[in-house]
Image (tube, rainbow, N blue to C red):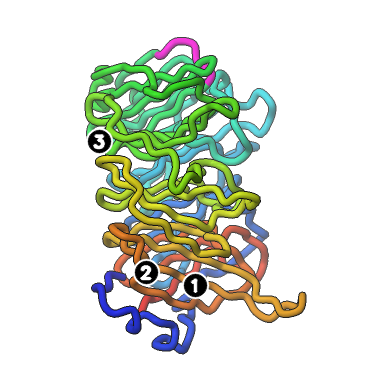
């Protein structure tokens, strides 16, 4: 989707009179799906996950390649953020109040959908959080599959499931992990105090352990990325910090990003952006986040900050709300899906894709997409193709569809 900078007139809608039509739509097939909980995109496949099954579709044709049913009466409860060397990692447990103590961690061959191994883990002591997937429970790096339990992090061989190492972390209200390269980041929270650890993914050596460098108690924290190390923090109470922290390789704070134009960032809150992983992202040296609009719950205003200094670089306001966000080839893509009404009457469903330069927030391209009422859960981009993963899974709604950018 890369497009060189050019005069604004090149990208005006009048130069794109027709909306882009889907090049394929995956078949719904069989019973109704539940809402999407997560996705993977790799090896020529896009995988859509619901609470009871995963379905993989060919990115070239939209044909279903495989389906994996969550076993027994379990529900899908966690997914690793990325597929590593063709291996996908997930966790599932019985849908009961004490189901977490009987959790199972499963590794799949993402090309075939075949199960490589399964291992039982007691995840009872983990903070339950909201319904849906629990982020930061499982992670992949190198040859290791890692699980955050209530007592510590357990690492298994990625392909065989054999035990490799364990790092205990003591009593905690919440523990979460994320991996990149040879590093695992472990964040634990206990009674408002948060601790960050950097762990060698190969052998479990703790490289450093430090308290979260923020002023005041922490109510929630999320690992946005392990490399660069970015933490989204929500403070406790009205005086608590709401910020994104960037830490260096030694755990020292490089930048604390909290507001733009006296408006606080919104690293968590909103029901609009279904894929919570995309509420804070980055491209090059620019962190992209949403800021709160007074009196509104939707996410419409994007801001860019320097990851090196924390300085506010730009603000871009869509005005209506953003339904999906992604970075691709050094650009930021924001997707807006909405109902066009006149005098309270439905006219049409519309969608626009905006492409922003992360350096200055300038809109360098825009496209209209031909859509129906189905909302996007998220989008994946590769080459000139955009993969739209639908939020809902009712009959008549394709679970995945593709558009070619032109």
Q: Which residue is mark 2?
A: 363
Name the secondary structure under disc 3. Answer: loop
The structure residue drawn at horizontal position 27% and vertical position 20%, both measured from the top left corner, is 204
Residue at 45%, 70% (x, y): give it. 353
Neighbor class of circle 1 (other Cα within 10 Å; few <14, some 14-19, many 20+) is some
Label 3 Cα neighbours within 10 Å, binned few <14 / some 14-19 / many ≥20: some
- Mark number displayed over residue 352: 1
Q: Nearer the viewer, residue 200 or 24?
A: 200
Label whose residue precedes the other's in the sequence (2 or 1): 1
Give the image location of residue 74, x and y in percent. Answer: 61, 36
250 to 231, vertically: above or below: above
CB atoms at circles 2 and 1 under 8 Å apart?
no
User: Farthest front residue?
Assistant: 262
Closer-to-camera residue (208/389):
208
- From the image, tell me which residue sits under label 3: 142
Quarter holding the N terminus? bottom left
Dot placed on the residue nearer the N-terminal end, 2 or 3: 3
Magenta stretch: includes residue 323: no
Q: Which residues are magenta?
A: 169-173
Q: Visible in this render: residue 159?
A: no
Residue 240, position as x, y percentages in the image:
53, 27
Query: Which residue is rendered at x = 43% and y = 76% of the image?
Result: 367
Q: Which is closer to the viewer, label 1 or label 3? A: 1
Q: Residue at x 45, y 48 (%)?
A: 261
């Amino acid at each position: 989707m890369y497009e060189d900078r050019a005069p604004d007139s090149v990208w005006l809608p009048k130069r794109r009179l027709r909306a882009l039509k889907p090049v394929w739509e995956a078949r719904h097939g069989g019973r109704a799906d539940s809402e999407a909980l997560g996705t993977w995109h790799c090896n020529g496949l896009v995988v859509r996950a619901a609470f009871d099954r995963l379905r993989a579709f060919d990115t070239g044709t939209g044909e279903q390649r495989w389906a994996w049913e969550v076993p027994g009466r379990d529900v899908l409860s966690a997914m690793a953020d990325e597929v590593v060397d063709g291996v996908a990692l997930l966790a599932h447990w019985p849908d009961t109040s004490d189901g977490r103590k009987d959790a199972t961690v499963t590794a799949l061959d993402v090309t075939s959908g075949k199960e490589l191994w399964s291992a039982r883990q007691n995840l009872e002591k983990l903070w339950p959080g909201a319904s849906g997937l629990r982020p930061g429970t499982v992670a992949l790096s190198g040859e290791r599959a890692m699980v955050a339990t209530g007592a510590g992090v357990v690492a298994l061989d990625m392909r065989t499931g054999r035990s490799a190492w364990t790092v205990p972390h003591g009593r905690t209200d919440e523990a979460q992990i994320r991996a990149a390269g040879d590093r695992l980041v472990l964040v634990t929270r206990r009674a408002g105090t948060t601790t960050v650890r950097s762990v060698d993914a190969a052998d479990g050596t703790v490289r450093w352990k430090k308290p979260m460098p923020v002023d005041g108690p922490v109510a929630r924290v999320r690992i946005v990325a392990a490399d660069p190390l970015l933490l989204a923090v929500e403070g406790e109470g009205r005086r608590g910090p709401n910020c994104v922290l960037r830490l260096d390789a030694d755990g020292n704070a490089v930048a604390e990003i909290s507001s733009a134009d006296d408006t606080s960032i919104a690293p968590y809150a909103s029901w609009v952006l279904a894929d919570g992983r995309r509420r804070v992202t980055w491209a090059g040296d620019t962190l992209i986040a949403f800021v709160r609009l007074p009196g509104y719950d939707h996410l419409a205003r994007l801001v860019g900050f320097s990851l090196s200094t924390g300085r506010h670089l730009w603000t871009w306001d869509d005005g209506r709300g953003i339904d999906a966000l992604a970075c691709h080839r050094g650009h930021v893509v924001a997707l807006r899906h909405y109902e066009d009404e006149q005098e309270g009457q439905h006219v049409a469903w519309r969608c626009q894709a905006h492409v922003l330069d992360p350096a200055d927030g300038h809109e360098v391209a825009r496209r209209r997409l031909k859509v129906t009422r189905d909302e996007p859960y998220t989008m994946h981009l590769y080459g000139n193709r955009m993969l739209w993963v639908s939020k809902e899974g009712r009959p008549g709604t394709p679970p995945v569809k593709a558009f070619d950018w032109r």
